[in-house]
Image: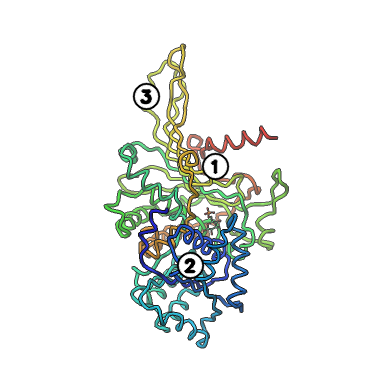
Amino acid sequence: MKNLASEIKTHFDLVIFGGDGDLSFRKIYPALYYRLLEKQISTEDRILALARKKLTNEEFGAVLKAELSKHIESLDEKILANLLSIITYKVVDINNSKEATGIKKYFEKKGDRVRAFYLATPASIFGQISSFLGQLGLINDNSRVVLEKPLGTDLISSEEINDKVAQYFKESQIYRIDHYLGKETVQNLMVLRFANNIFERSWNAQEIDNIQITVAESLGVGTRGNFYDKYGALKDMVQNHLLQLLCLIAMEPPITLDADQVRDEKLKVLKALRPFTKETISTDTVRGQYTRGKTKEGHLPSYLEDIDKYDSSTETFVALKTYIDNWRWSGVPIYLRTGKRMPHRFSEIVINFKHVPHNIFPEKKEIDNNKLTIRLQPEERIELQQMVKIPGPGGYRYKPFSLELDYADHFNDRFPDAYERLLMDVVRGNQTLFMRRDEVKASWEWVESILKNWKSEKVPNILYEAGTKGPGDLIMDEARAWVKSRHILKVQERKTDED
Ligand code: BG6
């Protein structure tokens, strides 16, 4: 990332609402620390952390240092001191005009800089914060606003939030975060597809049998139970992260990387997604909730124990089969699945190519299909499965092998966290990796076809034990069973060896 340092010429003021919140400590400040370390930002830039907790600047500095050391191994004292020197902490209550005056003063001397407002707060107050900034006269042509997900709990609430923010900021000033778009391996989907000619020729319904996207998490809901229970896996993960991955896999080549060109293409995918009906909702979707489970490390609590409630119909797992109804993808099933408390944390995309049309080999053993596996995390890798002749006599005996590109073998550098890239893009004014309003709307429209039919058809949660793989196989016919990635098999083998 070093070579990008010279690109950032503009100095900026970053104002973080929710400056003492979990997201800020886990993601935003560490991202700023690393960008300072890489000299992409400097001590000319300024950060204003706004929160309601009464702390002095010094007290906040001490809290921040303690928090950063939880997330960053061997903190560099000089970089930390630089970071602290550019952060000002201010107590703010957006309903209190006296405190607001202090914020106005902060900007008085430094007029002509990029001014980014990062709203790391619940989306329900995005409108209020925008109006607060508008009334203080702090929004100018150099201003940008960053909105954290989830943007609402359904189509209507999401539209309401977008409407309110739009009264103060133009669409070209609004940066809606989906942090998956900032991940290195997700950005590589563009390069894989559009800088390699061999794939594009066969990237269609004629050559591809099915596509599978999985984002599995081994953790449960942890301390976020209250929040999570209002959303569930569909709204928390599918509506945004999984659909964005699908867009990058399925979209037509954009003309350029210009933000609107890319987002136009993603939007077309979202609009072509086949909505669910009361006939398909039970056959093509599965929802689940984790119960107590057991691993080698010990017992795992159930979802209800995690959220401390007797009952909840919120799903912690969802798997579904959908289609993109356009020329390129007609008839190709797309399987999406995500869940908490799965056996392993891994995100991957599998492109299953069709089988060869006719087997000419005498052995007549099944010829496995070519398969492109893109492992997004935690170990970044790409595998291309192909059939290979087993050397030696005995005629044509064959077996599947994979060409493997393991990032760790080729790239030694630390991969910047998604937030580092996204924050810098806000400063640069590049919206390519952020969701446009019509994308958010189209994805909610499709998600609503699931929500509505889950409700009317009373689709129940299937219980699965924490630490197991969930009920996703229910929507797969055998031939398309969720792929057990070679890598997972390896990890399991290693574990058994150690036992
Ligand atoms: C967030 C969800 O958007 O993404 C969380 O709200 C989830 O529930 C997280 O755990 C997963 O992100 P990552 O980067 O750890 O895969």
State the mark number for residue 152: 2
Determine the secondary structure under disc 3: loop
Q: What's the CA distance linking mark 2 and mark 3?
A: 51 Å
Dot 2 amino acid type: Gly
Q: How many neighbours does mark 1 have within 10 angstroms: few (below 14), some (14-19), or many (20 or more)?
A: some
Dot 3 amino acid type: His
Looking at the image, is mark 2 or mark 1 nearer the viewer? 2
Circle 2/circle 3 CB separation < 8 Å: no
Closer to the camera in the image, 25 or 478 = 25
Q: What's the CA distance linking mark 1 and mark 3?
A: 28 Å
* Residue under label 1: 473
Q: What's the CA distance linking mark 2 and mark 1?
A: 30 Å
State the mark number for residue 342: none
**Residue 427, how many percent across, how many down?**
39, 65
Determine the secondary structure under disc 2: loop
Circle 1/circle 3 CB separation < 8 Å: no
* Residue under label 3: 358
- Of label 2 and label 3, which has the lower sequence position? 2
Q: How many neighbours does mark 3 have within 10 angstroms: few (below 14), some (14-19), or many (20 or more)?
A: few
Mark 3 residue CB less than 8 A from any atom of ligand 1: no
- Of label 1 and label 3, which has the lower sequence position? 3
Mark 2 residue CB less than 8 A from any atom of ligand 1: no
As drawn, the residue found furthest toward the front would be: 78
As drawn, the residue found furthest toward the right would be: 298
Looking at the image, is mark 2 or mark 3 nearer the viewer? 2
Q: How many marks?
A: 3
**Residue 449, how many percent across, how many down?**
45, 58
Determine the secondary structure under disc 1: helix
